[in-house]
Image (cartoon, rainbow, N blue to C red):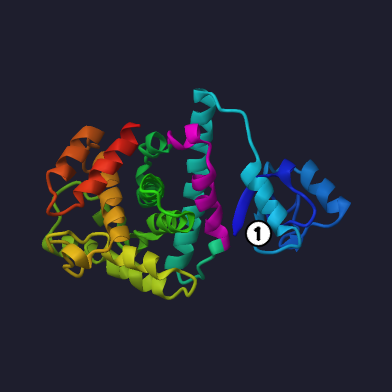
Amino acid sequence: MLTRIPKADIEKGMFVEAVECSETMFGKRRFVLESDSDMSAILTCPAAFVLINTAFGADRLKARSALKTRTRAPLSPAEAQVEAAAIVGRSVRVLKSELITMVTGGDFDMAGIAPVVDEITQADPTTSSLFFQVTRLKHKDETTFQHSLAVGILMGKLGEALDLDTGTIEMLILSGLLHDVGKLTISKDILQKQGPLTPVERKLIQSHPRRGHQILQKHAGIPAEVLEICLHHHEALDGSGYPSRLSGPQIGPLVRISTVCDVFDALTSARPYKRGWTVADALTWMYERNTIFDRKLVLRLGALIDS
């Protein structure tokens, strides 16, 4: 598993994937940390964090244990706000790079996107409570990437609230990050159009789940659950959704989580063609449409946002 840790926590025996600074400052990558010179070079370089791979290296169990037991002083509200904004900013940049690479025919690099999942799951509780607030601040040129990050965060938090296992929570986050990759194949002029969509334009937008699914299918390392969520996150319980008109028990619990989180973020986010709804209005609207959304999940999401 790829894990992002402060450079002060590195130990000999860890497998270093990358040191987060320019290659001119520290260019060595993918090696087992064994020498004092490498240790010193990492500690004195400008990087604050190191990406390690706990699946490799003779000391991998110790590295994982050290990560889990590491403690830090609670952050103040101001510090948590700064950290949340920094994590969101870094995550959007990584996500943008990885999604564009996939859409343009490049390989999916789990090593590149794993730090985003790790930062979301390992964030200080005070910091993670501010993720929702920070992700409301969307820039019009990066709406798809910021929306995907927000959905990934919401899916992970909802998974935690439902007491799902760690692997499933991480998979939910990854699914949220990748669920809208198909939108990158559609013109921004259509995605951000301020007036009513024509029937042709609406049909084109509704093709994005299949487009995304086709892109993700080309990459062997992507779990089947992620593919399913990408394809079906716009299905509705009454069969009125798209692209497959699934209904009721045909829609699995993980897809239901994605639908609730995706629509909630879309409703509460400001877009060029609309103002963002209040949290209360969005949750009420979704709760009243129990033929479309899983009402229990809407209630659980509401409790999560209000806490």
In front of the other: 281 or 183: 281
Question: Toward the viewer: 80 or 168?
Answer: 168
Q: Secondary structure at mark 1?
A: strand
In the figure, 129 relative to 14: above or below? Answer: above
Residue at 19% x, 48% y: name it.
Answer: 295
Query: Does residue 57 belong to the magenta stretch?
Result: no
Where 118 sits versus 187, above or below? Answer: above
Q: Main secondary structure of the magenta part?
A: helix
In the rendered picture of this protein, how many numbered marks are placed on residues? Answer: 1
User: Where residue 294 sits in the image (x, y, percent)?
Assistant: 21, 52
Instruction: Report x, y in % for residue 10.
Output: 74, 48
Which image quarter is the C terminus in? top left
Q: Residue at x 51, y 51 (%)?
A: 116
At 27% from the left edge and 60% from the top edge, which residue is drawn?
Answer: 233
Q: Quadrant of residue 259?
A: bottom left
Q: Which residue is mark 1?
A: 53
231 vs 23: above or below = below
| Residue in the foreground of this view, choosing between 161 and 271 | 161
Which corner quadrant of the image does residue 301 belong to? top left
- Image check: 170 left or right of 245? right
Q: Nearer the viewer, residue 305 or 116?
A: 305
In this rendering, position of residue 204 left or right of residue 221:
left
In this image, 137 relative to 286: left or right? right
Residue 126 is covered by the magenta coloring: yes
Residue 6 place in picture, x, y as percent: 67, 42
Q: Tell me if residue 283 can be seen.
A: yes
